[in-house]
Amino acid sequence: MSQQPPSPSPTQPPQDEQARWEERYATPDYLFGRAPNAFLESCRGLLPRRGRALAVADGEARNGVWLALQGLEVVSLDFAPSAQAKAAALAAEAGVAIEIVAADVHAWDYPEAAFDVVADIFTQFSDSAQRAAKWAGLRRTLKPGGQLVLQGYTPKQLDYGTGGPKAVENLYTRALLEQAFGDFDDLAIREEERELQEGPAHSGWSAVIGLTGRKPAAG
Ligand SMILES: C[S@@+](CC[C@H](N)C(=O)[O-])C[C@H]1O[C@@H](n2cnc3c(N)ncnc32)[C@H](O)[C@@H]1O
């Protein structure tokens, strides 16, 4: 009788994806820069003065470190060890402590109602099924009234090729974001074309969409 190879456990990170990111991060430079994402920074006024923040797929933690500098207790979640080593160095340099968690964002056990802020910035490696799992986790882990800040590329980005995934199903449209987060309070969705300078990986004229909103009490 032939034996089937064991299926990967849903809690194990997908090895070839992880290896691909490790290869990308195998440079002493910060692939996405050391400064925070401009959209996240523009949302400073929406953040609470204290509380807990989750930075999803935070890589080298430019965003996690910036959130910690705003006075938040940060969990920086990613699965790439090289990026997380740079994240620790960036936090030390900035003089802030962040909790660095190594896990697959599609399989992490998102604790219920645990975070006041979730930052989901450029996590478009997820296909539609993975995205549904990830966004269900983000929704679960936000406290009622908690602030979501999300940015990604739109399909128009395929014309520019200045960063982001090549698969159109991974890109965001207003309709997609409304379908996922349309019940959020104070929802704002902004589509724009602008110059991004976020390290060598995101550089040049870009088509992006950003969302802010608060988890509803019954969400
Ligand atoms: C485009 S980078 C963005 C990093 C960060 N959010 C930023 O804006 O600087 C995507 C990040 O997702 C991470 N990543 C990709 N797939 C992942 C997965 N399944 N679980 C955890 N992290 C993942 C990569 O290691 C990488 O750091």
Image (tube, rainbow, N blue to C red):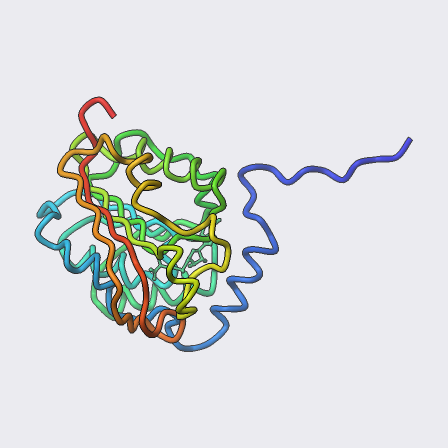
> Going by the image, does 45 lie left or right of 187?
left
**Front residue (pair 38, 171):** 171
Residue 25: x and y in percent read: 47, 69
Image-quadrant location for residue 67: bottom left
Residue at 30% across / 34% down in the picture? 139
User: Where does the N terminus fall, quadrant-wise?
Assistant: top right
> Going by the image, does 192 lie left or right of 88?
left
Image-quadrant location for residue 145: top left
Vertical relation: 106 (above or below) 72: above
Vertical relation: 133 (above or below) 31: above
Vertical relation: 18 (above or below) 93: above
Residue 22: x and y in percent read: 52, 64
Residue at 43% across / 77% down in the picture? 28
Residue 98: x and y in percent read: 28, 54
Q: Residue furthest right?
A: 1
Residue at 28% across / 49% down in the picture? 150
> Going by the image, does 118 lie left or right of 1?
left
**Front residue (pair 124, 100):** 124
Residue at 43% across / 62% down in the picture? 158
> Going by the image, does 102 lie left or right of 118?
right
User: Where does the C terminus fall, quadrant-wise?
Assistant: top left
Residue 21: x and y in percent read: 51, 62
Q: Quadrant of ligand 1?
A: bottom left
